[in-house]
Amino acid sequence: MRATRLYAPTLRETPAEAEVKSHQLMLRAGMIRKAAGGLYTYMPLAWRTLKKIMNIVREEMDAAGGQEIAMPIVQPSEIWKETGRWSVYGEEMFRVADRHGREFCLGPTHEEMVTTLIRDEVRSYKQLPLMLYQIQNKYRDEIRPRFGLMRGREFIMKDLYSFDKDEAGMNESYKLMYDAYTRIFSRMGLDFRPVEADNGAIGGGHSHEFTVLAEAGESNIAYCTSCDYAASDEKAELKVIKAPEEDMKSLEKVPTPGAHTIALVAQCLNLPLEKTIKAVAFQSDRDDLILAFVRGDHDVNDVKVVNLFEDAIELHMASDEAIIAAGGVPGFMSPIGLKEGTRVVVDATVMEMFNACAGANEKDVHYINVNPKRDFKDVTVADIRMIKEGDACPHCGAPVKMTRGIEAGQVFTLGTKYSQSLHATFLDENGKEKPLVMGCYGIGVSRTMAAAIEQNNDENGIIWPKAIAPFEVVVVPVNAKNEDQLRIAEEIYDELKNKGVDVLLDDRKERAGVKFKDADLIGYPLRITVGPKAVDEDTVELKIRRNGEVCTAAKADVAAKAIEMLEEL
Ligand code: ATP
Ligand code: MG
């Protein structure tokens, strides 16, 4: 391809509306243009990268036994009513009516569609396992479409659905997909972690999010520095920390005037935070009070607290009135001396403390010599702590690090949730009718392109991993008006093309500075520069975008050298 024929209008200035790097750089590199909030046109460079991502995804889905299909984007409301999701999905669903007033939606996902597709024709265990997938636009009317392609209202997703005869089969399909996803993100050259995820509303089973590590990510993840453990902070389990054993002294009240935060208490009594117990008061969506206690230097993980109570869906901070009604004093709360029946959750690590300090349910007063095992009555003990950097890995004990990541894909086991509500059954070996056991597996193709940029950029622009670069190599004649330079550049370009390299010739009659800036901004992995030295001394320059490394070669050797360098990238 020649740059004179490429539609990629680059911008020198960073557009004000773009907050994150990937959005800014895709606009500046002439890759995308906005049509409306969360709706973008993919221009030629972006589409080339997206096609490479889709090809990798497709190859791995096929290799794992997936069969590609294409279901309609427009879906009838009836099937969504059968599962009850027509109402549950709420405002995120784009809804349309046809000329007869019949209701449809633009598919945000396809569980209903694919399950109703197969329910009448998959009748026997002999037809299982079955894995069907597609790569197409999805539609979600997100409350806050933002960050360019990261959270769009129309985006490209690969969605695969697995159908098995039993849970063991489902777990095998899950493993196949987990491994395929690992290969996909590795082949794309991305630094990623499969992260144990909370599978929230879907319940039961397993789920992993494939997270591309990048500062702009919306997920907080903890990963081990020694083994391959990684989990979202909400989900990360923590080991109990045992304090060194001490003789239990007797409980004592001490004045702590004005010390209504744990930091002030520690200061007032000259204690390390690890010797203190801090309280967090929540109210559930039904307004029940839940008091949570963790060590002073720890934080409460409210997702873990919610999961302890079947009747709670969401927690918010408790009102002072609710705390007082339970016999507590805001700022001085204690598990000791609350009204009977108050729900108290104590972190398992707190139970292992000796002679600690906690509130006394009295204004300006704290207890010292609190020994939870002796003093706390009627409390629920559980792991309710939020992981933080330096905590011990729950698998191997090495310290964990915290990082931010972008969820690029997710694998889920669904069990029989959809097959039951949609009556998708089969006959097993004994002729017994059973619901199909399902899994679903998504990759945000367009979000992955954005995530790749978030992870791979510098002050000059994008640094594409080779496998998903719009072009692998750009050949730049420094002065395209010079016939000798242009001829040499064209010959190198032709040779590379013939050898199967994905190459662009920047034959534009622009200043060299402009072409170099564009090459850095668009981020081709390798740049080959043909200047006066190529004409006078038979010396052509090759430059690696990622590290700026430069080497030279005679024209006859350039193609071989370029291919060798690409192989090492
Ligand atoms: P999120 O939690 O970010 O909203 P999700 O859990 O709703 O995502 P899934 O239903 O699991 O997403 O969809 C599969 C994949 O589709 C996600 O892993 C993500 O990469 C991508 N995706 C989801 N929503 C969007 C969006 N609004 N824009 C771009 N990609 C998206
Ligand atoms: Mg998800």
Image (tube, rainbow, N blue to C red):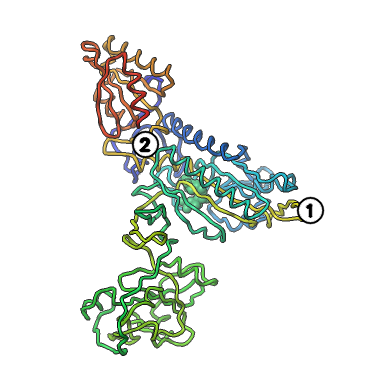
Q: Which of 178/78 is in front?
A: 178
- Residue 496 showing in the rendered view: yes
Task: First in sequence, mark 1 or 2: give its number.
Answer: 2
Task: Left or right? Give the position of 543 relative to 300.
Answer: left
Q: Residues within 10 Å of mark 1 (few under 14, many from 20)?
A: few
Secondary structure state at the residue bearing disc 2:
helix
Residue 181, position as x, y percentages in the image: 49, 44
Give the alpha-carbon distance from disc 1 to disc 2, as whole Å. Answer: 58 Å
Q: Of the residues shown, which amino acid type is indicated by label 1?
A: Gly
The residue located at (45%, 73%) in the rendering is: 382
Q: Which of 142/475 is in front?
A: 475
Residue 499 occupies quadrant = top left
Residue 132, position as x, y percentages in the image: 62, 42
Task: Left or right? Give the position of 184 relative to 367.
Answer: right
Q: Residues within 10 Å of mark 2 (few under 14, many from 20)?
A: many
The residue located at (37%, 48%) in the rendering is: 213
Query: Which residue is under mark 2?
Result: 27
Check the picture and name the quadrant holding the N terminus. top left
Q: Which mark is residue 431?
A: 1
Q: Which of 233/448 is in front?
A: 233
The residue located at (41%, 84%) in the rendering is: 376
Q: Nearer the viewer, mark 1 or mark 2?
A: 1
Secondary structure state at the residue bearing disc 1:
loop
Whether residue 42 is situated above or below residue 476 in the rendered picture:
below
Whether residue 358 is situated above or below residue 388 in the rendered picture:
below
Q: Which mark is residue 551?
A: none
Q: Of the residues shown, which amino acid type is indicated by label 2?
A: Leu
- Residue 141 showing in the rendered view: no
Residue 185, position as x, y percentages in the image: 45, 41
